[in-house]
Image (cartoon, coloured by chain):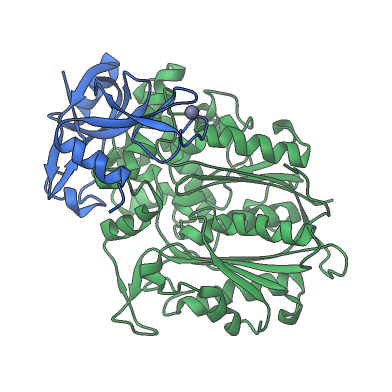
């Protein structure tokens, strides 16, 4: 069986690890991992583990019922735009935050806050969510 | 890379159905997708004064397979148009489909392979065939439509992880816009209200729009004398705070068609030249530190302006993809048509109206004209061609625009820009 990058990524999430790829040519980090460096296009990359630490830059919310039925029980959820320590951007569910306008407004007014991964298993799939520190 | 068309290419004719609901809207109610496509295509061929036998190729686009069940659509629809034994392809570039089709046609024509190409886009976002019936359809829940539509986006890591278009393409961008330009959330709210009023005014002046009621008329019908009160009511909930329902797309069913060809041998008196185009694509995430700028747009505008040899100052009419009203402001500013950070102010001052000095989306845009994924870019081109020819009825821009620029975001994300030029 061939090694699927996607499968390895999701399996690692289940062990609490965020896997990406680092380009051997230009050093850029591609996260989540793919078959080529996002910056230079090289396919010579090595696996790296990201710290998972990041800044939540903006916070909004999704709809209910959600487009993906996997999330029917937790929608509507807070959804944020995050910059990870390694300089890559990711958007994800933010756990533990209420989505009423007053709460979301307070986050907007506060500006970027620190977040860490809060990986969940949702109906058999490992999901990279985050929580505010 | 070559960046010029080797021969001039023209839009010879345009067609578009009313955008609406195949189960409800009188002009299209009860039609099959074959008939819907034919309505737009036959209007375009009549407009171009082209006989079906003169068409060298049919490029037909459709995005959402579960609602069409037409994976190789062109071969089926070609028969319904009297076009046989010609080249054809089914393709999709999501919500940029029809305009990407125009660029494919243009490259084939400029290369000398084809003389005339028919591009068609068709879509139903509101219903699907009922138990494989050839003519009966049944409505689909909104979340199911989004599930299928989201097949166009990040299937490896985004959609399985809870991705949702409304925060990613509305809420977060609106917050980024406010922070970048020091605009308060109250100013944002009022600006988006005025922008919606403008789009709805345009829809009310267009017999093909899905929403032909102004915001004021709808407010009154719902029992509000003050449309601003209606705007802030439970009838206009947040879809992704701070963005509300009336700042986003209205899904629709519809079809559009364009005949692209050479000037020589064309009998139509008012062809519009395709001066240039630019396409740039990427998957999520579409932006980094600044959610108001997607780098793909910067690229696609530059490519199109360079090919057409224009600058933003030359633009008389602009349409940008506006299934998110705040993103449409961001993109219009990135295009250079509106000054940075001023778009909502322009909306407040009525400058984006058909009778303003910076007209945009005069057909009503994705909210008022409606959005039928693969057909929508063609509806934008249809409007631009009608405006250039001075045939836009009560919403006609005066003086008639000569240079029109049309931008669409094909989900996701295919940033496509066309530069059209014509008129007297
Ligand atoms: Zn690299």
- Please give the name of the residue rendered at 36% of the width and 65% of the height, measured from the top-left corner: B126
Q: Pick out the residue farthest to the right.
A: B264
* Residue B225 is at least partly visible in this image: no
**Residue B77: quarter of image:** bottom right
Label count reads 0
Q: Is residue B396 above or below residue B28?
A: above
* Position of B137 relative to B369 (above/below): below
Which residue: 83% across, 54% down?
B7
Colour-to-chain, blue? A
Residue B400 in the image, given as x and y percentages of width and height? 75, 48
x and y, in percent, of residue A73 in the image: 11, 48
- Please name the residue shown 69% across and 32% down the image: B312
For this rendering, which residue is in front, A19 or B168?
A19
**Residue occupying the far front of the picture:** A1
**Where is residue B325 drawn, in percent x and y?**
45, 40
Frontmost residue, B23 versus B410: B410
User: Residue B35 or B9: which is nearer the viewer?
Assistant: B9
Locate residue B112: give its quadrant: bottom right
Asked if residue B418 shows in the view, the reply is yes
Quadrant occupied by the N terminus of chain A? bottom left
As drawn, B136 above or below B2: below
Specify whether A119 is left or right of B355. Answer: left
Q: Is residue B259 above or below residue B226?
A: below
Q: In the rendered view, does A108 fall on the left or right side of B52?
A: left
Quadrant, the C terminus of chain A: top left
Task: Please state if B391 lies on the left or on the right of B339 as rendered.
Answer: right
Tell me the green chain: B
Q: Position of residue B206 (x, y in %)?
A: 55, 58
């Amino acid at each position: 069986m061939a090694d699927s990058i996607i499968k390895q990524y999701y399996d690692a999430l289940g062990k609490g690890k965020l896997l990406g790829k680092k380009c051997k040519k230009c050093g850029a980090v591609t996260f989540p991992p793919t078959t080529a460096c996002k910056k230079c296009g090289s396919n010579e990359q090595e696996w790296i583990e990201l710290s998972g630490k990041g800044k939540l830059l903006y916070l909004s919310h999704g709809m209910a019922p959600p487009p993906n039925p996997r999330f029917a029980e937790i929608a509507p959820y807070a959804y944020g735009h995050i910059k990870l320590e390694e300089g890559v951007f990711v958007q994800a569910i933010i756990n533990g935050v209420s989505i009423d306008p007053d709460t979301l407004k307070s986050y907007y007014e506060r500006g970027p806050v620190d977040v860490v991964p809060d990986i969940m298993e949702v109906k058999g799939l490992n999901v990279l969510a985050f929580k505010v520190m | 890379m070559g960046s010029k068309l080797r021969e001039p290419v023209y839009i010879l004719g345009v067609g578009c159905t009313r955008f609406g609901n195949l189960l409800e809207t009188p002009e299209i109610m009860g039609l099959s997708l074959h008939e819907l496509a034919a309505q737009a295509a036959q209007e375009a061929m009549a407009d171009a004064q082209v006989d079906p036998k003169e068409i060298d190729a049919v490029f037909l686009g459709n995005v959402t397979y579960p609602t069409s069940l037409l994976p190789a659509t062109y071969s089926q629809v070609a028969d319904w148009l009297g076009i046989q034994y010609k080249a054809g392809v089914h393709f999709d570039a999501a919500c940029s489909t029809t305009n990407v089709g125009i660029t494919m046609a243009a490259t084939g024509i400029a290369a000398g392979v084809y003389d005339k190409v028919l591009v068609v886009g068709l879509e139903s976002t509101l219903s699907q065939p009922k138990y494989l019936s050839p003519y009966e359809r049944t409505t689909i829940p909104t979340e199911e439509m989004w599930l299928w539509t989201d097949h166009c986006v990040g299937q490896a890591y985004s959609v399985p992880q809870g991705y949702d278009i409304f925060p990613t393409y509305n809420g977060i961008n609106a917050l980024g816009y406010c922070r970048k330009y020091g605009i308060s959330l109250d100013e944002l709210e009022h600006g988006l209200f005025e922008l919606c009023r403008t789009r709805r005014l345009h829809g009310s002046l267009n017999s093909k729009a899905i929403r032909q009621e102004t915001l004021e008329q709808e407010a009154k019908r719902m029992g509000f004398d003050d449309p601003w009160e209606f705007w802030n009511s439970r009838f206009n909930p947040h879809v992704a705070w701070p963005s509300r329902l009336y700042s986003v797309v209205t899904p629709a069913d519809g079809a559009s068609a364009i005949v692209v060809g050479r000037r020589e041998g064309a009998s139509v008196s008012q062809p519009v030249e395709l001066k240039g185009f630019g396409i740039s694509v990427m998957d999520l995430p579409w932006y980094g530190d600044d959610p108001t700028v997607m780098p793909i747009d910067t690229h696609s505008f530059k490519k199109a302006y360079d090919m057409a040899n224009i600058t933003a100052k030359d633009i008389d009419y602009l349409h940008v993809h506006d299934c998110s009203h705040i993103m449409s402001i961001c993109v219009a500013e990135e295009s250079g048509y509106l000054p940075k950070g001023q778009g909502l102010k322009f909306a407040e001052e009525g400058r984006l109206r058909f009778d303003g000095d910076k007209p945009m989306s005069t057909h009503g845009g994705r909210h008022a004209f409606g959005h039928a994924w693969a057909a929508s870019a063609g509806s934008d081109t249809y409007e631009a061609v009608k405006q250039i020819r001075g045939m836009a009825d009560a919403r006609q821009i005066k003086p008639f625009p000569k240079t029109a620029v049309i931008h669409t975001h094909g989900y996701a994300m295919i940033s496509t820009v066309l530069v059209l030029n014509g008129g007297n």
